[in-house]
Amino acid sequence: MEKPDLDQDKPFLSHLLEMRTRLMRSLLVVLVAFLFIYPFYDQLFTLVSEPLRAVLPTGELTAIKVAGPFLIPMKLSLVAAIFVTIPYLLYQIWAFVAPGLYRHERQLVWPLMISSSALFYLGAAFAYFIVLPLVYAFFAGVTPLGVQYQPDIGEYLSFVLTMLVVFGIAFEVPIATLLLIRTGATTRDALAAKRPYVIVAAFAVGMLLTPPDIISQVMLAIPVWLLFELGLVLSRWYRVSGREATENSVDPTDT
């Protein structure tokens, strides 16, 4: 019987150990952030619910579930901890995959990490300050007579967190565009030729991921389209830089 080659398993095991280490570091950082944030859950919930409470007749939400007043602040604090630590979490992901990248690709780690974090926060801020107030005003305005519009805190939190995450991820379109062109998966001209499909896809995503109102759908689709155009504009420089870097790079397997 042929014996297994243990040397071939060592790289795989080392990758697993490194992944476990980085995962544990990420969980520890999120836990520490949670412990710092949780004592301020009242102020945090007041901040998150402000756009909705501004259009409510009583300015108050309701708690339908018995354990809601206890579980919702914990959930909100945990999500806030993840939001705060996103740059560190992205760094751990990039640091894990960096050893398998080319030299010129490793040079993109810090710019991509910083820009992706900034774009995510920008998308979440766009949803909070612009989209959510318009959506809440729309819902409050179409409430039938005799019905008091006073959402449950659990459903509201799930709704607002979904919107923040969706817009945060949607604002990563320029990064995705640059990576597709930089890695050679496609070209700028090929992406530009697919512009009509991108616009249709942006509105389709807006329809699927946002509430059934035209305001939030349009407010998601238009920024996605504009950010796609921004990615095409920036790719003019990245395309040239990427070619030069490729010519001067060394295959990581040769080192």
Image (cartoon, grey):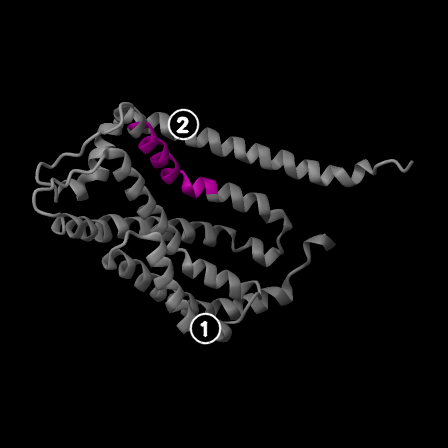
The answer to which quarter of the image holds residue 56 is top left
Please identify the dominant SS of the magenta region: helix
Q: Please state, as top left, top right, bottom left or bottom right, where the N terminus lies in the image.
A: top right
Q: Are marks 1 and 2 in contact (CB under 8 Å)?
A: no
x and y, in percent, of residue 200 in the image: 38, 68
Residue 249 lies left or right of residue 133; in this view the side is right
Q: Amino acid at mark 2?
A: Val
x and y, in percent, of residue 14 in the image: 68, 36
Residue 58 lies left or right of residue 26; in this view the side is left
Q: Residue at x 34, y 36 (%)?
A: 80
**Residue range highlighted in magenta:** 73-89
Q: Which one is nearer the viewer's eye here, 97 or 45? A: 45
Residue 12 lies left or right of residue 119; in this view the side is right
Q: Residue at x 16, y 38 (%)?
A: 150
SS label for mark 2: helix
Q: Is residue 159 above or below residue 228?
A: above
x and y, in percent, of residue 117 in the image: 40, 48
Residue 46 in sight from this viewpoint: yes
> Which label was assigned to residue 32?
2
Q: Which one is nearer the viewer's eye here, 214 or 134? A: 214
Q: Amino acid at mark 1?
A: Lys
* Mark 1 or mark 2: whose residue is earlier in sequence: 2
The answer to which quarter of the image holds residue 153 is top left
Residue designated by label 1: 194
Q: Is residue 38 above or below residue 241?
A: above
> Which label was assigned to residue 158?
none
Q: CA distance from mark 1 to mark 2?
A: 45 Å
